[in-house]
Image (cartoon, helix red, strand yellow):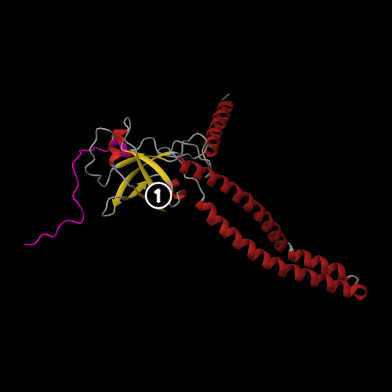
């Protein structure tokens, strides 16, 4: 009876070990959406995103915005977008902007008129750095969709090139064995088929040279595809909550930078 109990508990322990080792290692905080391996998520609205103003030019019309989701890298110069301030969402406080440049987790935009950003009753005397903006862009959603489709095409091309490279690598792996086999076969009839043996070996050498050149071209092409795949990767979306929305906004103005020089 004790032997049966020991066996039963040993079975439960092994089952727990295998269950633990086979369970996926998923992130425990931060990301709540499914990983679509860089493709578009059909459950996400890519037209809306948030950003924070980090800098602006002297005229105050060109703003540099930091975002938490890098899908803004798909913007192009001249793309149109709309944005509102968080406290004017229920009003007509919409502003229009045009993208100038993009970089990793940043983009700059040009705003002609800020008067509409503060709603009907707002004054908007100063558009300070650190302001949180909520953006809406139909163009970005279309660009994300196009990027996802481009990534699909690139993956199909990569799979085809990998298949060719695998065949070539298999040939090089078995090259020595094939050479020995061919040599042994023709050594038995060396007096009769010496010329045929020489031709067969020459064909293998020529094929090796051709495959070496093709291997180099395929590796260069795959490196280029890896670079393009990284560019067209759609970033995962997003956090449990936007930390910027939790900031305590005291409404105090910020001074201009740089500060005036103080002399003793």
Is 71 or 219 nearer to us in this picture?
71
Vertical comparison of 212 with 1: above or below: below
Task: Give how far across and how far down residue 202 sits, in percent.
Answer: 80, 72
Q: Which residue lies furthest to the left in this view?
A: 264
Q: Residue furthest right?
A: 192
Task: Give how far across and how far down residue 129 sits, in percent.
Answer: 26, 47
The residue depicted at 32 percent of the width and 44 percent of the height is 52
Vertical comparison of 175 with 194: above or below: above
Vertical comparison of 158 with 87: above or below: below
The residue depicted at 88 percent of the width and 72 percent of the height is 196
Task: Give how far across and how far down residue 195 sits, in percent.
Answer: 88, 75
Q: In this view, does 183 lie to the left or right of 240?
A: right
Can I make out residue 105 in this image? no
The residue depicted at 42 percent of the width and 45 percent of the height is 80
Can I make out residue 17 in this image? yes
**Quadrant in which the C terminus is drawn:** bottom left
Q: What stretch is highlighted in magenta?
A: 244-264
Tag 1 secondary structure: strand
Q: Which residue lies furthest to the top in this view?
A: 1
Is 215 or 135 nearer to us in this picture?
135
Q: Residues within 10 Å of mark 1 (few under 14, many from 20)?
A: many
Question: Residue 210 is drawn in which quadrant?
Answer: bottom right
Residue designated by label 1 = 99
The residue depicted at 22 percent of the width and 44 percent of the height is 126
Is 170 or 70 nearer to us in this picture?
70
Vertical comparison of 145 with 202: above or below: above
- Asked if the stretch drawn in magenta spans residue 10, the answer is no
- Asked if the stretch drawn in magenta spans residue 251, the answer is yes
């Amino acid at each position: 009876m004790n032997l049966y109990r020991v066996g039963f508990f040993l079975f439960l322990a092994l089952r727990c070990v295998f269950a633990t080792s086979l369970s996926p290692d998923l992130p425990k905080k931060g990301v709540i959406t499914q990983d679509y391996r860089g493709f578009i998520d059909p459950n996400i609205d890519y037209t809306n995103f948030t950003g924070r103003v980090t800098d602006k030019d002297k005229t105050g019309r060109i703003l540099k915005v930091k975002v938490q989701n890098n899908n803004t890298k798909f913007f192009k110069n001249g793309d149109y977008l709309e944005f509102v301030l968080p406290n004017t969402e229920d009003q007509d406080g919409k502003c229009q902007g045009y993208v100038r440049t993009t970089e990793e987790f940043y983009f700059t935009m040009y705003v002609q008129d800020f008067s509409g950003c503060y709603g009907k009753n707002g004054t908007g005397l100063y558009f300070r750095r650190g302001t949180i903006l909520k953006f809406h862009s139909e163009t970005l959603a279309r660009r994300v969709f196009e990027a996802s489709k481009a990534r699909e095409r690139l993956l199909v091309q990569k799979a085809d090139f990998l298949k060719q490279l695998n065949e070539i690598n298999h040939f090089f792996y078995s090259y020595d064995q094939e050479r020995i086999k061919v040599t042994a076969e023709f050594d038995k009839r060396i007096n009769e088929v010496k010329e045929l043996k020489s031709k067969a070996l020459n064909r293998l050498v020529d094929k090796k040279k051709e495959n070496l050149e093709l291997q180099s071209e395929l590796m260069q092409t795959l490196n280029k595809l890896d670079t393009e795949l990284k560019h067209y990767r759609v970033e995962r979306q997003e956090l449990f909550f936007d930390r910027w929305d939790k900031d305590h906004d005291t409404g105090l103005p910020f001074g201009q930078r740089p500060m005036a020089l103080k002399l003793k």
